Structure formats: C-alpha cells, structure tokens
Image (cartoon, rainbow, N blue to C red):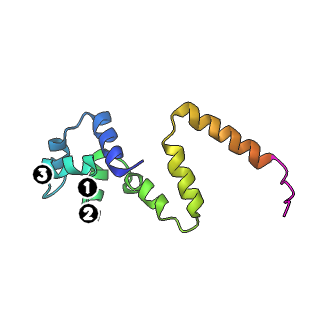
Amino acid sequence: MALDQTLRLLAKARGLTAAEIAAAIPRVGAATVSAWMRGEKTPGSAQLDALARAFGVPAGALLATLAATLDPARTKGEHELLAAYRTLNTRQQGALLEVARTMAQAPPRKSRD
C-alpha cells in the first residue's frame, strides 16, 4: 500500500484529523500533512519517525510498499505482477492465487523448441 493510503487509513482508524497529526510532528502544519495524505508530498525521515510514533506503528510499516519496490531480488516481471495483483478486488486476488498455486505445483512442461 502506498504511503498516502497508509496515512489515510491510520488517521481514519485513530479518528485523527490532519491538524491533530501535524500537532504531533515538529515544524509541520496541517496543510503539509494533508499533502502527504493526498500523495502530493513525501515526508522526510525525521517526519516519518514522528508519524510512526503518532500512529504507534513501526516506521518501516509506513514505507513497506516503497521498500518492496526497491527490492533488487525482484525481477521486472515480479514487480509488474504485484502491481497488477494490487488492482484486483479480493475475489479476483483469491482466484489468481489459486491459479498460481496450481501452476507452481504442476510438473514442468517440456519445451517444443
């Protein structure tokens, strides 16, 4: 999940407004927090730490999606598959996983090259 989505969900879950979140972060106003929540700006590392403390979550949890996109072990195809998966609804995700598991368990097919 993208940082802006994570921030919106955490704010809603905790019943916090942008102004209330901003009050917990030194030198940040409600307009800046709102911009983070819309995905228009990205907080710096000190601000991320303050956000994590305000929400009571590890700072890494706020950046999980960003960190995953930087994973050098993933191939381009894996990134594309994950991005496509995230666009699906829950039922579609379940069906796709079922197909993938079935394919992974099937014996490899011989190439016709």
Counting residues from the N terminus, which is met first, the one under dot 1 or under dot 3? 3
Q: Nearer the viewer, mark 1 or mark 3?
A: 3
Quadrant in the rendering for residue 6: top left
Residue that badge 3 annotates: 29
**Which range is magenta?**
106-113
Q: Secondary structure at mark 1?
A: helix
- Is mark 1 in CB contact (under 8 Å) with mark 3? no
- Is mark 1 in CB contact (under 8 Å) with mark 2? yes
Give the percent coordinates (x, y) of residue 69: 47, 60
Residue 110 falls within the magenta-colored stretch:
yes
Q: Residues within 10 Å of mark 2 (few under 14, many from 20)?
A: few
Instruction: Indicate the amino acid at tag 3.
Output: Gly
The secondary structure making up most of the magenta span is loop
Please tell me whether residue 93 is drawn above or below residue 68 in the rendered image: above
Camera sees residue 24: no
Residue that badge 1 annotates: 50
Give the percent coordinates (x, y) of residue 76: 56, 63
Closer to us: 3 or 61: 3
Give the percent coordinates (x, y) of residue 100: 69, 45
Instruction: Indicate the amino acid at tag 2.
Output: Ala
Counting residues from the N terminus, which is met first, the one under dot 3 or under dot 2? 3
Q: CA distance from mark 1 to mark 3?
A: 13 Å
Q: In this image, 29 relative to 93: left or right?
A: left
Q: In this image, 101 relative to 88: left or right?
A: right
Give the percent coordinates (x, y) of residue 55: 30, 45
Please tell me whether residue 39 is drawn above or below residue 10 in the rendered image: below
Residue that badge 2 annotates: 46
Residue 81 falls within the magenta-colored stretch:
no
